[in-house]
Image (cartoon, rainbow, N blue to C red):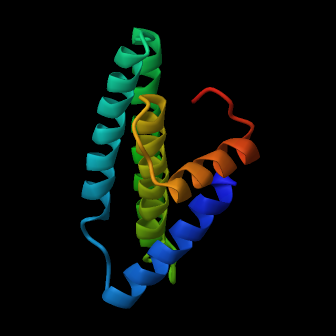
Amino acid sequence: MEKYIAFISGAAGAIVSYLVGGLGMAVTVLIALMALDYVTGLMQAAINQSLNSRVGFNGIIRKIYYLMLVASVYLIALVIPGIEYAGDGATVAFCVLEFISITENGTKMGLWMPKFVQNLLAIVKDKTGEDNGK
C-alpha cells in the first residue's frame, strides 16, 4: 500500500509541477519534513524508553539515501527529454511518506489522531506487513 501511496503522490506531484512550471521548494520541504520525522522519532523513542543510537544512525543514513535518490532523478531528468518534472514528483512522494511517518510517531507516543489518519496508518501497516514501526 505504501508503494501505491508513493506512486500516486509522486505522479500527482509531477503533474502539479508541470502545470505550475516547477515546484522549486519541494526539496526544501522534504528536508524539513525529514528533520521533523527524525525529531518526532527521537521523541517517540524517549517516551517509549527505546532510544537506540544504532536505530537513529540508520534513520539518518536512510534519509541521506532518499535525498541522493531524489538528486539522481533530477540529474537523469536533465538528459532525458520529457521528464523534467519527475524529480518534483519523486520529491512529493517522499514528502507524503515522511508525513505518514511523522503521524505514526505521534500515534506511537499515544497522541490523538483523527480517525481517518488512524485508518490510513492501519491500512499502510497491514499492506506492508509492518507491526511495530520501521
Q: Indicate the quadrant where residue 74 lies.
A: bottom left
Residue depicted at 32% across the width and 48% down the height: 33
Residue 75 position in % (x across, y down): 42, 61
Image coords of residue 116 (percent x, y): 54, 59
Q: Is residue 78 left or right of residue 129?
A: left
- In this rendering, the count of numbered labels is 0
Image quadrant for the C terminus? top right
Q: Residue at x 68, y 34 (%)?
A: 130
Image spot of residue 103 (x, y percent)? 44, 44
Looking at this view, name the residue that lies furthest to the bottom: 19
Residue at position x 41%, y 85% in the image: 18
- Can I make out residue 72 in this image? no
Dividing the image into 4 quarters, which one contains the N terminus? bottom right
- Which of 86 and 112 lies nearest the eye of the viewer? 112
Of 84 and 108, nearer the camera is 108
Instruction: Please identify the quarter of the rendering in which residue 25 is found.
Output: bottom left
Question: In this picture, is 1 found above or below 38?
Answer: below
Query: Does residue 61 appear to the left or right of 35 in the view shown?
Result: right
Q: Residue at x 48, y 30 (%)?
A: 108
Residue 37, percent from left and from top: 36, 38
**Which residue is at the front of the view, 134 or 15?**
134
- Asked whether residue 86 appears in the rendered view, the answer is yes
